[in-house]
């Protein structure tokens, strides 16, 4: 088990949106579908590389939603054999995290295992779907990332800290949007059932 340190003052890169990211996700999903087979309820492309036109660190984030968290001993062996390292409780309690790096140590893939209905699962999906439907927020967030990268090119913790207030506000807006959308869908469904 290896636990990556998100507080290291490491170098990182940003890229303009690349449609190839979707193809990379599909290749990763193929592997994960075999490794996690029955355990996986869904395998989703999440994070900034899953949002069209988003400037992002070129790291493919994948969410595997499972019915229940378990040791995943066999899956950890298979993922290690496929070149991944792993850790536990990295993004939230009761989660498993796999990651792959290039030879220079820069991360290229993050695989997050979360239970169905967990707060982290909801956060990944709500944020992704909100950004996918709000291009003005994508531009605002991309511009902020570029600004922060120019200010803190070799200091990833400072980069993360500088965008935290914006992300907090964005998350609140995303959850409000999701609540309204869910309520509207229920109203529409109920009107058809009358």
Image (cartoon, grey):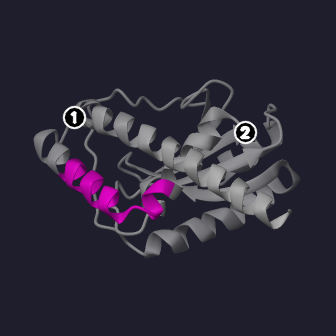
* Sequence-wise first label, 1 or 2: 2
Point out the frontmost of discs 1 and 2: 2
From what the image shows, is residue 165 above or below residue 139? Answer: above
Q: Magenta span has 107?
A: no
Q: Magenta span has 138?
A: yes
From what the image shows, is residue 57 above or below residue 73? Answer: below
Q: What span is in magenta?
A: 130-146
Residue 192, percent across and down? Answer: 80, 67
Residue 180, percent across and down? Answer: 56, 49
Q: Secondary structure at mark 2?
A: loop
User: Can the viewer see residue 106?
Assistant: yes
Badge 2: few (under 14), some or many (20 or more) residues near its Cα, within 10 Å?
Answer: few
Residue at the image position 69 percent from the left and 35 percent from the top: 118
From what the image shows, is residue 98 above or below residue 57? Answer: above
Residue at the image position 72 percent from the left and 47 percent from the top: 65
In the rendering, which numbered label is found on residue 117? Answer: 2
Tell me the chief SS of the magenta region: helix
In the rendering, which numbered label is found on residue 129? Answer: none
Side (left or right) of 57 relative to 151:
right
Q: Nearer the viewer, residue 94 or 5?
A: 94
Structural distance between the alpha carbons of marks 1 and 2: 34 Å
If the image is split into quadrants, where does the N terminus sit?
top right
């Amino acid at each position: 088990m290896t636990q990556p340190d998100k507080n290291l003052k490491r170098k990182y890169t940003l890229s303009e949106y690349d449609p190839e990211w979707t193809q990379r996700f599909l290749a990763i999903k193929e592997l994960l579908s075999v490794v996690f087979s029955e355990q996986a309820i869904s395998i989703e492309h999440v994070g900034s590389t899953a949002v069209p036109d988003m400037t992002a660190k070129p790291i493919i984030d994948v969410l595997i939603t499972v019915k229940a968290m378990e040791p995943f001993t066999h899956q950890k062996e298979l993922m290690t054999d496929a070149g991944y390292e792993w850790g536990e409780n990295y993004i939230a309690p009761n989660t498993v995290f796999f990651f792959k790096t290039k030879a220079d140590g820069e991360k290229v893939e993050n695989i997050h295992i979360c239970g169905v209905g967990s707060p982290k699962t909801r956060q990944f999906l709500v944020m992704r779907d909100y950004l996918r439907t709000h291009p003005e927020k994508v531009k605002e967030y991309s511009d902020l990332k570029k600004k922060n990268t120019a200010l803190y090119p070799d200091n990833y913790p400072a980069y993360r800290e500088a965008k935290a207030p914006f992300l907090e506000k964005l998350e609140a807006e995303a959850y409000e949007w999701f609540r309204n959308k869910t309520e509207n869908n229920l109203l529409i469904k109920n009107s058809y059932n009358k």
